[in-house]
Amino acid sequence: MKKFFIALFFLLLLTGCTLNFDLKSNENETKMYETKLNNGKISIYLNKETRGFNLSYFKKSGNKWKIASSVEIGPATLNKNWAISSDTKPYLYFGTVSDPQEKIIVGSNDATQVKVNNINFWYYVDFKATKNLSIYQVINGKKILIQP
């Protein structure tokens, strides 16, 4: 009987530690945008610790959503800022533009643009896992290469 209570105590202790970690993780993130995409979902959120913005692609695993790929850009005080995830599939292209009229093209596809809290974000998700697609910015009809 004593072994049962010891095992129960450790199980409850482990559960409490896990819940506390999840709560701390959520305290450091503020979700700003979310949409469904190819049996998964895309989320843009602010990481309060790094003051950077994250774009993450989530896939459902059982009853929980798990990050399949993620990329972070620096604080949005910069007019133009972008990054590419290169660690796991799908590859994510993510950035900001100062003018919402500016169009971003990744490879030969238009990036999705969203405005959240007066910040103009763009993103593109490459499910074919083609690394290092070129990124172009279209300003006043002129296509400018920003990432070869």
Image (tube, rainbow, N blue to C red):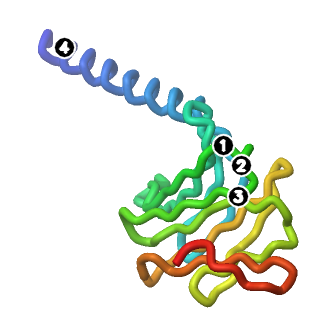
Tell me how many marks there are.
Answer: 4
Percent position of residue 85, x then y: 46, 63
User: Does residue 7 appear left or right of residue 46 in this picture?
Assistant: left
The mark lying in front, picked from 2 and 4, is 2
The mark lying in front, picked from 1 and 3, is 3
Residue occupying the point 59% across, 39% down: 47
| Mark found first going from the N terminus, 4 or 3 | 4
Picture disc at residue 75: 1
Residue occupying the point 61% across, 60% down: 82
- Give the spatial CA distance, label 2 vs label 4: 54 Å
Helix, strand or loop at disc 3?
Answer: loop
- Give the spatial CA distance, label 1 vs label 3: 10 Å
Residue occupying the point 60% across, 80% down: 106
Query: Badge 3 local density, few (<14 within 10 Å), some, or many (20+)?
Result: few
Identified by mark 3, the residue type is Lys
Write down the residue under mark 3. 80
| Mark found first going from the N terminus, 4 or 1 | 4
Identified by mark 2, the residue type is Leu
Picture disc at residue 78: 2
Q: In the figure, residue 50 lies in which quadrant?
A: top right
Q: Confirm or deny contact between disc 3 and disc 2 (CB under 8 A).
A: yes
Query: Badge 4 local density, few (<14 within 10 Å), some, or many (20+)?
Result: few
- Give the spatial CA distance, label 4 vs label 3: 56 Å
Q: Nearer the viewer, residue 29 or 118?
A: 118
| Mark found first going from the N terminus, 2 or 4 | 4
Picture disc at residue 6: 4
Percent position of residue 6, x then y: 19, 13
Q: In the figure, residue 8 lies in which quadrant?
A: top left
